[in-house]
Amino acid sequence: MTVVNTKNLVKDYGLNGMTVNALRGVSLSFTPGEFAAVAGPSGSGKSTFLHLVGCLDVPTSGSVSIDDVDAASMQRKQLALLRRRKIGFIFQAYNLIPVLTALENVSLPLTLLGAGAAEARSLAEQALADVGLANFGGRRPKEMSGGQQQRVAIARALVKKPTLILADEPTANLDSKTGKEILELMLNLNRIAGTTFIFSTHDSMVMEYARRLVLLRDGLVESDTVRDAATAAGTAS
């Protein structure tokens, strides 16, 4: 079984009258419970790949399947529902809603899925506790540090128990100590829940933690390495 399967994924953009080939035929599969990083230099296509896998954009050609469902065959509303049910997102800018408390930010995905207020609150409180923020539910983003905001973002991504978590440069705005704490947290949650994590990154520390490292260059897969857990960072956690 695969959580993500891409076949001959191509994405072209128009820029100043020219065509930019962001992805030029990427075929990759990810299985349940992977902790993988897609890395490469600026312009390699890693963020484009993540956006296509997350159904935030559509490919020029090729296909993306999530849990064996072909996203290319779906209409916009169906894609929105797929994202809402199956995929959790963690962004480098956190993307929390500033006027909402941490608890309200985390419970929002459940509310959008039709959960009742009491259920959403209970599950959100547990998700905040899971990321070490049990006593921060009443705080708004501006009242928290960057690391705390990223923990809230992780709780928000995980609260609906998605099949897949996509993390786009999740440590980019954090100092190295906080970045390591966030990676340890996500690795622990990956072990406990078995959720598949795919990172887009240029951070060497994220690459060290990844159990699988895919390197892109000029829109193509340059290498795809699965590492023994004993050789990756965070194994003693």
Image: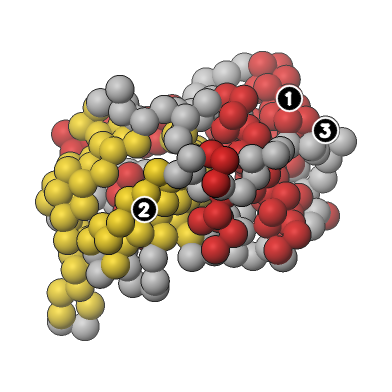
Q: Where is residue 235 shown, x and y percent of the image?
A: 64, 40
Q: Label 2 sits on what residue type? A: Val
Q: Secondary structure at mark 2?
A: strand
Q: Where is residue 172 shown, x and y percent of the image?
A: 59, 64
Q: CA distance from mark 3 to mark 2?
A: 35 Å
Q: Residues within 10 Å of mark 1 (few under 14, many from 20)?
A: some
Q: Where is 220 relative to 27, above or below?
A: below
The residue that appears at 27% across and 61% down in the rendered structure is 222
Q: Nearer the viewer, residue 22 or 84?
A: 22
Tally of marks: 3
The residue that disc 1 covers is: 126
Q: Label 1 sits on what residue type? A: Gln
The residue that appears at 74% across and 41% down in the rendered structure is 102
Q: Secondary structure at mark 3?
A: loop
- Residue 162 in view here: yes
Quarter of the image holding residue 34? top left
Q: Earlier in the sequence, mark 2 or mark 1?
A: 1
The residue that disc 2 covers is: 214
The residue that disc 3 covers is: 134
In front: mark 3 or mark 2? 2
The residue that appears at 52% across and 26% down in the rendered structure is 194
Q: Residues within 10 Å of mark 2 (few under 14, many from 20)?
A: many
Q: Label 3 sits on what residue type? A: Ala
Q: Residues within 10 Å of mark 3 (few under 14, many from 20)?
A: some
Q: Where is 100 relative to 34, above or below?
A: below
Residue farthest right in this picture: 135
